[in-house]
Amino acid sequence: MGILFGTFCVGFVIVVWMGFFGEIPSRKELQNKRNDTASELYSADSVLLGRYFIYDRTNVPYKQISPVALKALVATEDARFYLHEGIDLRSLGRVAVKTVLMQNESSGGGSTITQQLAKNLYPRRDYRYLEMPINKTREMIMARRLELVYSKEEILELYLNTVSFGGNIFGIERAAHYFFNRSARTLKAEQAAVLIGMLKATTSYNPLANPERSKRRRNIVLNQMVKYKYLTPKVADSLKNLPLRLEREKKIQNQNIAPYFREQLRIELAEWCANQTKSNGEPYNLYTDGLKIYTTIDSRVQQAAEKAVRARMARLQKQFDDHWRGRVPWGKDKTVLDNALRVSARYKRLKNQGFSDEEIQQVFKKPVSMTLFSWNGPIKRTMSPMDSLAYYQRFLNTGLVSMDPESGFVKAWVGGINHNLFKYDHVRSRRQVGSTFKPIVYAAALQRGIEPCTYFQNVLTTYNEYEDWQPHNATNNYGGKYSMKGALSNSLNTISAQLILKVGVDPTIRLARNMGIQSDLPRVPSLALGTANISLLEIVSAYTAFANQGRRTEPVYVTQIVDRTGKILRQNRPKRGKKVLLAENAAIMLEMMKAVVEEGSARRLQSEFGLKLDMAGKTGTTQNQSDGWFIGIVPGLVTGVWVGAESPLVRFRSLDLGQGSNTALPVWGDFISRIVKNDRASVIKGTKFEEITPEIQEMLSCASYIPDPPPQEEESFFDRVLESLPFNLGNEERRQERQETRKDRREERNNRLRNLFKRKRNRDE
């Protein structure tokens, strides 16, 4: 009977070995086997921004794993690891007696570390019959082959890089960071014991979910280390008395940086990887090939941007809520909520499950318990999903992007106020740009030879040839003549219209294309007023030409990609920008946009934020105040901010509250002021723009505004008669007196006009 059983066992092993139940990896395949590894995203200042993975894993070499972790593993999982060759028959017998019969927890498992590694590399299969014997036999055969191609150290390294620590955490390096905010190399004995103790049951012994149970299991591991003389009893006793301490705060904080940027890059990198092949001919996989992606984002600048967004958007939202208190911003227009419903994740999930629109409506009307976002912290409420959609539609959102105009390196990228709730990235989204397009029109005028001191009448004009188009100024004030500098600083629509008609719509569009605007541009004169839908990234990139001597730079946010072996797969070095403007015209534009800050719609940057460095920029406000913009330039940095709601119908009702100088500009000012106070990244290059030449100074030396001359007073008939009488003594004296009176009256009227202009200039566009 025994011989028959033995013959059956040998035959069973041979059948498995021959691949009857599935091919078993060869030695060559095992030698080339590499486990899936997460790709990592790093900032320019070496901060880990995020990871792309299916399994959250970072491989580390044997020498970068704490020796106490290796000893704890061997003592607990496979005490005879260095004595067997993949299969430990003595351990199998011990388990049969101690674990099964005596229920002794500390006896270890029947599988060796090498067998467990085989199971990690090649998960078990489902078989109808004899599932456990087949899988165990397969693992034994693979374990023997692994021992033939790997050293003991390599097996331990591979095992600790593949093993699961619960959830989506794989490998000791990730586990060390996740639970203790340290690398595997710096793990202490008590910390290593916690992690090795989890291998028996990752959920039951998870220190976050079950701290007391995890501590007891830790102490069992420490006892095992004493038993096999890896620790002295005295040291182990002192460690067992220590409380369970976890340190995760720093990791969580870093992982929250730049969520919109990480998601945008994930989409681009996944596409890039699919078009790059490895040496074996397979395409790279962003989630499994362990790439390291180095970006231009500076974590310190990014954090300053995110703090500015939080501070200013919270304040603006309160102002918006007070403005609309007791009223609905979209009134009776049902399209706002209908659109929000159809793009919601809940609606799409129910639709995919086969629910009809009527059934979905019923689901959305049923009150449920939920946690809502607010700027003052989470709010727990019971409300219907439809009411929650209405709640979130009232929020104003924003986008901010900041880049070095010379290199094109993007330093900060904020796509919205909360990535968990608002997925749409407003750095990439296209909205009407308003007056931020006007500098492109003015630059086109300079390129066509129009002098900056050319004066234009500020008159309301109807253009019959363009369907009776009548561009109005935002403040509805007209009169006087303006130089280009004065017209831009006061954002006069009347003069922007005259300029684009003088330059031509097509030449203006050609310049916009050269400056990096890729969005659709309508071939109509109203383009000068910013009627086109353009992304924030495009318009910021266009403005780099003004700050870079007429050279426009492409946005760059990835500097290098390397594979797990350190091979460079892609490298982006700074490139000289494309020449799109004459250098003198770029300098003139920068000077004219400085006037926007010094005497125009962006004056509050100096008064409210106390910024003393050179600044240039342009505010923008679209029709009905749906979008507010500010694109600003300081030495070494071009930054753009957009503010608006998800729906253009959600907006401030008044220009004073809804214009870009009240919505977007404060975010920009807060961001720049934070950097100025603590510019550890050195992104701002001094406090002054490059000094303009005397020739350019001469070209700009003219008044921004010339008021209309007052109407001449007519002499009365009686005065003319008296003047004609030869006997009228004192005639000359009276004539001089009347001339002085008229002169005084003209001066008084001119003063009134000047005061009127000053008051008008104190308003925003």
Image: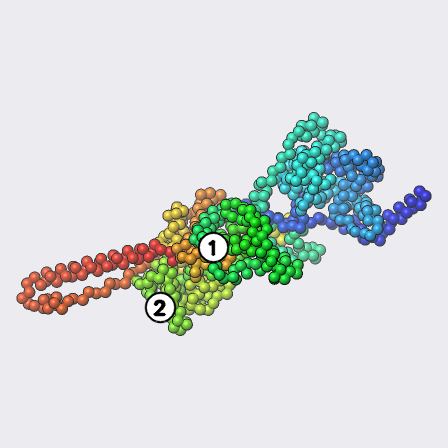
Percent across and percent down for residue 462 are: 37, 70
Q: Is residue 268 visible to us here?
A: no
Residue picked out by circle 2: 461
**For residue 599, what is the image quadrant?**
bottom left
Three-letter code, disc 2: Thr
Residue at the bottom extreme, as displayed: 465
First in sequence, mark 2 or 1: give its number. Answer: 2
In the displayed orientation, state which residue is furthest to the left: 727
Mark 1 nearby-residue class (10 Å; few <14, some 14–19, many ≥20): many
> Is any atom of residue 177 visible in this view?
yes
Residue 675 versus residue 469 in the image, above or below = above
Query: What x and y, as percent, mark residue 631?
Result: 44, 55
On the rendered structure, is 461 left or right of 302?
Answer: left
Does residue 449 sit above or below 254 in this rendering? below
Compared to 731, does 103 lie above or below?
above
Label 1 is placed on what type of residue? Val
Q: What colouring method underlies this structural image?
A: rainbow
For the residue pair 169 and 502, the one nearer the viewer reads as 169
- Residue visible at 65% across and 30% down? 242
* The N terminus lies in quadrant: top right
Q: Mark on residue 643? A: 1
Query: How many circles with numbers are drawn on the protein?
Result: 2
Q: Residue 442, image x and y in percent?
A: 40, 62
Residue furthest to the top in view is 234
The x, y position of residue 125, in whole percent, is 78, 51
Q: Dividing the picture into quarters, in which one does residue 339 lie?
A: bottom right
**SS for tag 1?**
strand
Q: Residue at x 10, y 66 (%)?
A: 723
Q: Secondary structure at mark 2?
A: loop
Nearer to the camera, 308 or 297: 308
